[in-house]
Image (tube, rainbow, N blue to C red):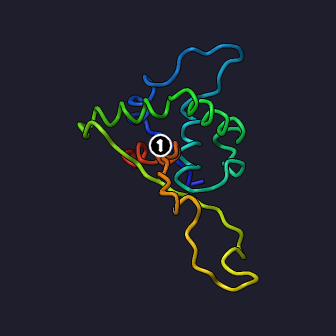
Amino acid sequence: MSNLFWLNDDQWQKIAPHLPQDVRGKERVDDRRVISGIVHVLRSGCRWCDCPKEYGPAKTVYNRFVRWAKRGVWERLFHAFADSAGVAEMLMIDSTHVKAHRSASGGKGGSKSRLSAGHAAGAIRRYTHSQMIKAVFAAFS
C-alpha cells in the first residue's frame, strides 16, 4: 500500500536512542514497525483496530502507544527533539475533542443556546499525547 507511513533510516537513527531498552519477558516486536504504525494511525485518523496489518497486530500497536504514554516515552521524545531543534524552553500544544451524538444538536424543546458545564466553569484545556506525537512526527514529513 502506497499510503502507509514508514520511518526512514535517518528518522529511525534519531528516535532509537530515546526508546526504552529495559525489556523483560517475551521478546518485543520490531519497534520501528510498531512506531511507524502508531504514526500512521495518528496521521490518518483511523481507529486503532483499523491499523493496516503491515504494521503488525493492531492490539500490539495500540498497547505500545498506551504503555509508552504511561511511562512518559513520548513526552521525553518530544522534549529531546524540541531541545535539539533549539526551540523555546516551554512549548504548549492545545487540543480539545468532544464527541456528540449525531442528533445532539436538536431535540425536544428546540434549540437553546447554553454554555457547556466545562466552558461555563472556565475549564482548562488539556493536551493529548497523540497531539504531542503528531507534532513531533510532523517534523519528519
Residue 91, percent across and down?
33, 43
Dot 1 crowding, Cα within 10 Å, few <14, some 14–19, many 20+: some
Q: Amino acid at mark 1?
A: Ile
Place of residue 97 in the rendered image (x, y in percent of width and height, measured from the top left): 56, 58
Compared across the picture, whether 12 is left or right of 59 comes to: left
Quadrant of the image occupied by residue 61: top right
- Pick the residue in front: 61 or 86: 86
Q: Residue furthest bottom?
A: 110
Q: On screen, 17 above or below 83?
A: above
| 51 left or right of 90 in image | right
* Picture layout, residue 130 above or below residue 16: below
- Left or right of 39? Residue 80 is left
Secondary-structure class at tag 1: helix
The residue located at (69%, 81%) in the rendering is 106
Q: From the top left corner, tell me how far across and down residue 70 is, in percent.
A: 58, 30
Which residue is label 1 attached to? 133
Q: Compared with residue 74, is residue 125 higher up or lower down, i.e. above or below?
A: below
User: Residue 33 or 84: which is nearer the viewer?
Assistant: 84
State which quadrant residue 81 falls in.
top left
The image position of residue 102, as x and y in percent, is 71, 73
